[in-house]
Amino acid sequence: MRTQTRSLVDPQYDHLFTERERDIVHRLLASESTRTIAEKTGLTVSTVNTYVKRIRKKVGARGRVELLARVVGSENIREMVRAADLTERERDVVGSLLAGATPAQIADDCGLAVSSIQTYIKRICRKLGVRGRMELLAYFRSGAAAAAAAAANGDS
């Protein structure tokens, strides 16, 4: 299972991480909390947070959502965005979120109000049955993981 998840990490970033950092990234991709990661790895919560900060710095991410968006391989994500029943604007918003943009940055790029982007995000979440940006990212990661597993098993 770890190998399948590893294939989702963009090679542009994967080589930057130590083995411990790579393990923490994979656990974050599996939506494990900092506390759960600490318990499973035998580290303290503070140490896990230090690793996460170090990883964020290596990829130039400001937060966890942006970190995860940057390290996930982009091709699987693009296919899932195309396959989802979203409008063109909603696909643009999802793509920007997955690239690590904030609603304010997306609004600025699209020439829309931040409240409009937040409305798009709410609609996307409602359509996909998720609650918020973190679950939205997890939704696309889990689908990408299923696609990677199918590819590894030779399914089409």
Image: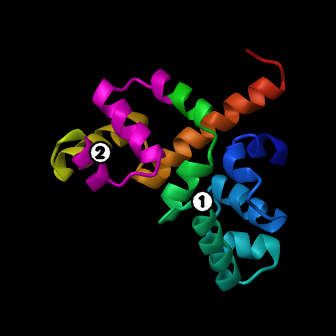
For residue 122, the mark is 2
* Nearer to me, 115 or 74: 74
Residue 113 left/right relative to 135: left
* Nearer to me, 45 or 127: 45
> How far apart are the alpha carbons under marks 2 and 1?
28 Å
**Does residue 24 lie above or below 141 as drawn?**
below
Q: Amino acid at mark 2?
A: Lys
Magenta stretch containing residue 94, yes or no?
yes
Look at the image and tell me whether residue 87 can be seen: no
Q: Residue at x 49, y 65 (%)?
A: 63
* Nearer to me, 16 or 100: 16
Q: Residue at x 57, y 54 (%)?
A: 68
Q: Quadrant of the N terminus?
A: top right
**Range covered by the magenta-colored residues:** 81-109
Q: Amino acid at mark 1?
A: Val
Q: Residues within 10 Å of mark 1 (few under 14, many from 20)?
A: some
For residue 59, the mark is 1
* Nearer to me, 51 or 144: 51
Q: Quadrant of the C terminus?
A: top right
Q: Residue at x 58, y 68 (%)?
A: 57
For residue 155, the mark is none
